[in-house]
Amino acid sequence: MTGQLAFVESPVQLLNVLEWAHTAALQDPPRLQAVPPQPTRRAPVPATGGPTGGQGGGQGGDRGGDRGGVSVPAVPAVPAGPAAGPGRTGPGDLTVVVLSPTDPMSRGQLRRMAQLARDEGVTVKWQDARQGRGAVVRTLRELAGPLRAADRVIIGDPFSRYVQLLLTLFGPRRVTVVDDGTATMEFAAQLARGERLVRWHRRGSRGPRELVLAPVTSMARRKLAPGRHRTVEIFTSLPVEPPPGTTVLVNDFSWTRSRFGPPRLTRGADLVGTSLVETGVVDPDEYLRAVTVLARTHGATRYFAHRRESAEKLHRIAVETGLEVVRPDLPLELIARRGPIGRTVVSFPSTVVHTLPLALAGTGVKVAVCEIAPEWLRENASPRAQGFLAGVAGTATRTERLEFG
């Protein structure tokens, strides 16, 4: 494995690597200077459903299954779009290493995304990086050589301890960071300020584990920063201020739009779930109340679950609101683009309020964002949570702001 080497740990990261490769293939080598993000096409939002009671999730042994009484519609097999085919995405020397997570929903989506990448002519190496004793050491040993040989390294999650550990092996000459949700905004801000890399929803306290890993994090931050012998690029659909010395390349989801859709629109609305309860930011009772009010106000019939939402919470949503809970087995941008999708898509502050309008540009779908009220936050939520979430919603220029009540 040489040339372009990507490390991904989530389905969205892999999708954005394909988007980056598609964008890179449209540029003449050497790659052109990137431009900072700017308002692009206006777009709406979709989502996909299916018959109630099927199994979703993965392939083979990674099936999501029926989760605690929650409807898990089966999403049809994803065909390559009419323009798809080997080598269409480029660059031809791209290898994607999937550092496989352990939860079944993520693994299932990743296997589907991996097949889409192979259909595009991309080499995909599945690495069970967290399976069994010795997995970390084995993974580091197997990837050390390819990492040293790579001319460019593409990273899906700069906050990942696994990726940071890999970066201690070698400092790549060219680094590209692709979106892994709204964390990209915090990464750019922390890199610009010279701060240590910490996810926005974590509190500032440093426990024993953080102290042990501090040298790894510090070294990784240096290797993710531009320097005399290193260029750094951020490929994003989010509004970020480029840190000094970096370039920003705009992700407008042109690969997704060229391969899938346009979707069939339904008359109703769809809600998009969030894992803010699971990450300890939002109180579960307040979240359920908000979902109930939004569903009633907008006439929503389906709830598209985030892959990290717990089965218990989703069961409660299905029972108490009457919404059909859908566990997509691909990133929502692809599910929405294929359709069917509601004419209105309502979401809490998350990446999709930025990405869905791009993926669904020109379809007529309206995307609306409902901000997180301060009283919804848990007492032990990070002090930065309210400001960060308000920024995510406030910078979503292609969405409609909702008044909650």
Image: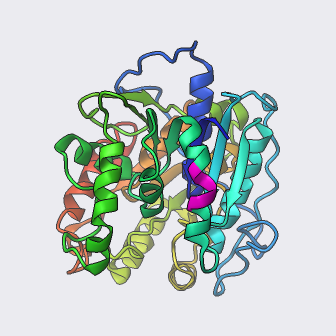
Q: Residue furthest top?
A: 28
| Left-right relation of 266 to 314 | right
- The image quarter in which residue 130 lies: bottom right
Q: Dividing the image into 4 quarters, which one contains the N terminus?
A: top right
Instruction: Residue 360: name its quadrant.
Output: top right
- Magenta span: predominant SS is helix
Instruction: Check the image and report above or below for 4 versus 110.
Output: above
Question: Measured along the vertical axis of the image, is residue 146 above or below residue 210?
Answer: above
User: What is the tally of numbered marks visible in this picture?
Assistant: 0
- Would residue 191 be visible to someone looking at this image? yes
Quadrant into which the C terminus falls: bottom left
The x and y percentages for residue 381 are 24, 74
**Residue 364 visible in the displayed image:** no
* Closer-to-camera residue (52/62): 62
Q: Nearer the viewer, residue 2 or 292?
A: 2
Q: Identify which residue is drawn at 34% across, 60% down.
A: 216
Magenta-span inclusion, residue 349 = no
Q: Which residues are magenta?
A: 140-144
Q: Residue at x 24, y 66 (%)?
A: 373
In this view, 293 is above or below 257 = below
x and y percentages locating residue 158 in the rendered image:
40, 51
Q: Which colour style is shown?
A: rainbow
Residue 378 rendering spot, x and y as whole percentages: 25, 79
Position of residue 121 measured from the top left corner of the image (x, y, whole percent): 77, 35
Residue at horizontal 57%, vertical 77%?
A: 322
Report the front residue among 356 and 32: 32
Q: Is residue 142 magenta?
A: yes
